Image (tube, helix red, strand yellow):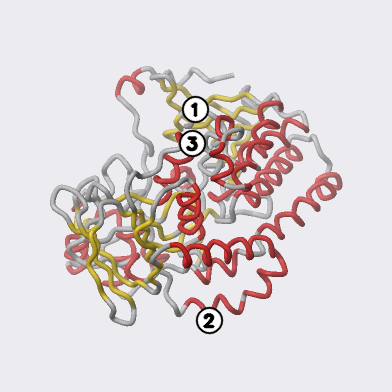
Amino acid sequence: MTGGPDLLIVGAGPAGMSAAVVARRHGLDVLVVDEQSAPGGQIWRNIETAADTSRAGILGKAYSDGADVVRRFRASGAGYLPGARVWHLEPGPRAFIAQNGVARCIDANAILLATGAQERPLPFPGWTLPGVMTVGAAQILLKSSGQIPDEPVWIAGTGPLSLLYAIQLLKAGGRIAGFLDTAPSANLAGAFRELAGAFLGAPGDMLKGFGWLMALRRQVRFIGNVKEIEAIGNEALERLRYITANGRSATVDARLLFVHEGIVPTIHPTLALGCKHIWNAAQDSFAPDLDTWGETSVSDVFVAGDGARIGGAQAACHLGELAALRVAAKAGRLSRAQLAAVAAPVRKRLKAALAIRPFLDRLYRPRSAVFVPPEATLVCRCEEVSAARILEQAAAGRPDPNQVKAFTRAGMGPCQGRQCSYTVASLLAAKEGRTVPDVGLYRVRPPFKPITLAELAALDAGAVIP
């Protein structure tokens, strides 16, 4: 026993909030820390403010469903520290946080990482120009303050989020100049094999998705099977060039370009802890190696939600519940028989929530250019390192990403490799005839989130938050 909370939860999104509710139901002392100023995570961002406004209707039922989860979390009695940034983790487990300009540490009996996912890194020519941003960032503006662009936008990418945001933007009164669908047409054959299972397991989600697609095709200029995009401009985006797989190309005027190629689990926290990771070939990403309860290879460290596997909000809720049940059982609040009995319906709901994933993973598999961009493309925008420079290092031997990091400074900027680690690994793999799992990612060193010297100076390593 450490004297800290029974369960420390990092992240107040669907998984973190659901875990807190279940853990409190079984009498555990729970503390939730989260970077945002209010609960909801990225998917339900600002839900308490937006739930009773017209914005909720624009964002859809899946967004509005978060209001009930937030209410149950608020009523659970769990401790809650908003605006708290976790910048380091150690086995024990122990978390180091920064809040209100002060760094502190928290010891706990168990920790649940519910840190969600990030958009897949997507370097392409011109991606750093003002006027180019991710679909996820644009959706944050819509959720947080109802902001929409005041001029037509181009959307380029693939995946459910691209379609969803486009529909939300149109409902909010925005305009779309064109939608460039970058999903390779070859994906259809693999997705078709999963079609029956997806319709049987999640008919509502499937019909909703097809409805979005049909609505977009009717209302906006829709170009499919796009294999290359380039943002062109001097001080800001001025034009957009695209090429389709059948050789059709065009250059169009553009002032705003929103891009998206799916999401990947946030793994910096588990990498920092030294947890074992595995390669998820279906989602082209690494993920922590977990048991059926979400526990990592490091004892008493759990992961739930999209940080464990990409599955969406409902699956995240169920994964959070399962992790909390296991923590409760390890704390002696549930017998083995009780644990199995209460977990069984949760597992059934989780299976249903994940039924659509094989179809989505095959249909929206990213195109090859996402992983290996042209040589002139900036790969690490923090340190302004191009793909060509990474390939120069590969030509000199068989360096791993950490050697490339030392030679080029790629991955040493504020994002600590979140935006370039996968691309560097993919470039090395392509150059050396290896695979990304074989090449691996950067080692994560503290701090994995930015922290000021003033915050660090305020840290008293012996001061544990009770």
> Which residue reaches farthest left?
234
Q: Residues within 10 Å of mark 1 (few under 14, many from 20)?
A: few
Kind of residue at badge 2: Ala
Give the side of residue 5 with respect to residue 385, left or right: right
Q: Mark 3 — residue?
A: 90
Circles 3 and 2: CB distance less than 8 Å?
Answer: no
Along the line of sight, which residue is nearer the eye, 240 or 414?
240
Give the side of residue 272 with respect to residue 204, left or right: left
Quadrant housing residue 141? top left
Q: Mark 1 — residue?
A: 37
Work out whether residue 112 can be spotted. Answer: yes
Circles 3 and 1: CB distance less than 8 Å?
Answer: no
Q: CA distance from mark 3 to mark 1?
A: 25 Å
Q: Mark 2 — residue?
A: 189
**Horizontal and vertical percent position of residue 97:** 46, 28
Q: Which residue shows up at 68% across the image and 72% down it?
A: 197
**Horizontal and vertical percent position of residue 259:** 36, 56
> Between tags 3 and 1, which lies in front?
1
Kind of residue at badge 1: Ser
Q: CA distance from mark 3 to mark 2?
A: 45 Å
Secondary structure under the numbered disc 1 in the rendered image = loop
Q: CA distance from mark 2 to mark 1?
A: 44 Å
Secondary structure under the numbered disc 3 in the rendered image = strand
Along the line of sight, which residue is nearer the eye, 16 or 390?
16
Q: Which residue shows up at 23% across the image and 47% down it?
A: 130
Q: Quadrant of the C terminus?
A: top right
Q: Earlier in the sequence, mark 2 or mark 1?
A: 1
Q: Earlier in the sequence, mark 3 or mark 2?
A: 3
Q: Residues within 10 Å of mark 2 (few under 14, many from 20)?
A: few
**Horizontal and vertical percent position of residue 177:** 34, 59
Q: Residues within 10 Å of mark 3 (few under 14, many from 20)?
A: some
Kind of residue at badge 3: Glu
